[in-house]
Image (cartoon, helix red, strand yellow):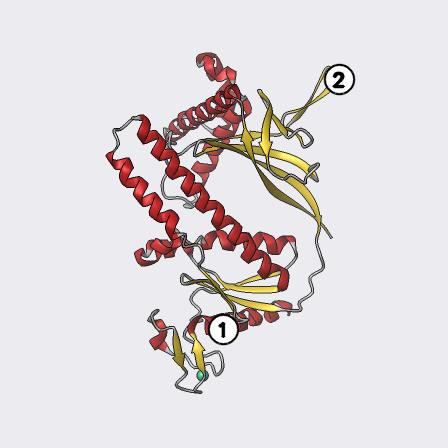
Amino acid sequence: MIQKILRGYIFRLYPTKEQATLIDKTIGCSRFIYNYSLKERLNKKITNYEQIKNLPNLFTEYKWLNEIDKNALYNSIKNVDRTITNYENGLIDIVNFKSKDKYNVYQTTYYESNLNGKLYRSIKIDFKNHLISLPKIKNIKYRGYKKKTNLQGNIKSAVIRRTAGRYYISLLVAEEIVKPEFIPRSIVGLDLGIKNIIVTSYNEKIENSLECTNIYKRIKGLQKGLNRCQPGSKNRYKLKLKIQRLYLKLKNIHKSLIHAITNKIVNYNDIIVMEDLDILEMYQKRSMAKHLIKIPLAEIKKVLRYKCNWQNKKLITINRYYPSSQICSRCGYQNKLLKNLKIRNWTCPSCGAEHDRDINASLNILFEGLKVYINSLF
Ligand SMILES: [Zn+2]
């Protein structure tokens, strides 16, 4: 069975000074149009369609918008529409204007056109010479995916991002993959937590090696220095950049660990069962929020979901109110005392089985998922 998927490829860009200036300008203009359109929409004077139609008028009013990739500006308006729709549907609580500190990104869409018999493609990648071309910015040097010689699919869009003084591009590519047949040979229950990120029903504990205590310590130290710096000073800028780079480093460490963990789980199991955790709710609990910043559970869940989809594995989520850690996986007795998270080991008062809290929970999650799976067959 052939399936169409969207895959993201991230490259680090090495723009020349001129190219970097143009990227910065495009980012700035995208932010300007975003805030401008958002303001208009909040005043309820105008629809998304009208905004798109009116955009060329702004090009005459604000001449500097003509220097950059206009596609990025249309995308800004579309993003505003998405934000407003999400807000109206209750998916987000608050609509924010984008500040210079936070909005360092622009998006451009792929298109083709015929110019005097010559095919123009708005986004191009030259793997031989390691160059990426974007509208208005040709031949930007990049690094990444050394072994790749071409893309197995069509580029849909590109997001250009400035993080910690560095530039990245992520290309969204539509690919066709052959989905393997689903054969249910093995099943695993996963207990996601804080002390151990994942405990599997195979007695495996994946500990939280994401602690990265040293990096956090360095960030803390630099932050102290930052508070002592004069606002707007060169030193302050330098320190800020250093902190941003450390955060980027953490993000990359997290990312590679998440991929290693999820690959292992998805490659060796056909049915994967986990709790339907409400991450937002967990964040609201103060005691948990502190840890969650360091353990991206939401990200793990997201990556598991798409990897299962690509490899045709079944991901079953069970009700988050199922008391997986209170039930004895051997006899089914429910021990309410275990609501106390500090109890890590316990003996079942009914059958005498000795349990490790997390492994017992992962077994219960497996059993519950098996029930869901079997029910789905009839
Ligand atoms: Zn028992």
Q: Residue 28's spot in the image, x, y percent?
A: 44, 24
- Measure the C-alpha gap from mark 1 to mark 2: 65 Å
User: Element type at marker 1?
Assistant: helix
Label 2 environment density (alpha carbons within 10 Å; few <14, some 14–19, many ≥20): few
Give the amino acid at mark 2. Answer: Gly
Q: Is residue 302 visible?
A: no
Ligand 1 lies under 8 Å from the Cβ of mark 2? no
- Which disc number belongs to residue 226? none
Residue sitting at x 60%, y 59%: 266
Q: How many marks?
A: 2
> Of callouts 1 and 2, which one flags the residue occurring earlier in the amino acid sequence?
2
Q: Residue 34's spot in the image, x, y percent?
A: 43, 28
Ligand 1 lies under 8 Å from the Cβ of mark 1? no
Which residue in the structure is indicated by mark 1?
364
The quarter of the displayed image where residue 267 is located: bottom right
Q: Is residue 194 visible?
A: yes
Residue sitting at x 54%, y 73%: 367
- In screen coordinates, is 74 left or right of 87? right
The quarter of the displayed image where residue 9 is located: top right
- Extreme residue toward the bottom, this view: 351
Residue sitting at x 33%, y 76%: 337
Which residue in the structure is indicated by mark 2?
117
User: Element type at marker 2?
Assistant: loop
Q: Residue 226's spot in the image, x, y percent?
A: 29, 36
Q: Residue 63's spot in the image, x, y percent?
A: 46, 12
Front residue of 155 and 220:
220
Give the amino acid at mark 1. Answer: Asn
Is there a contact, CB below 8 Å, between mark 1 and mark 2? no
Label 1 environment density (alpha carbons within 10 Å; few <14, some 14–19, many ≥20): many
Residue sitting at x 59%, y 70%: 375
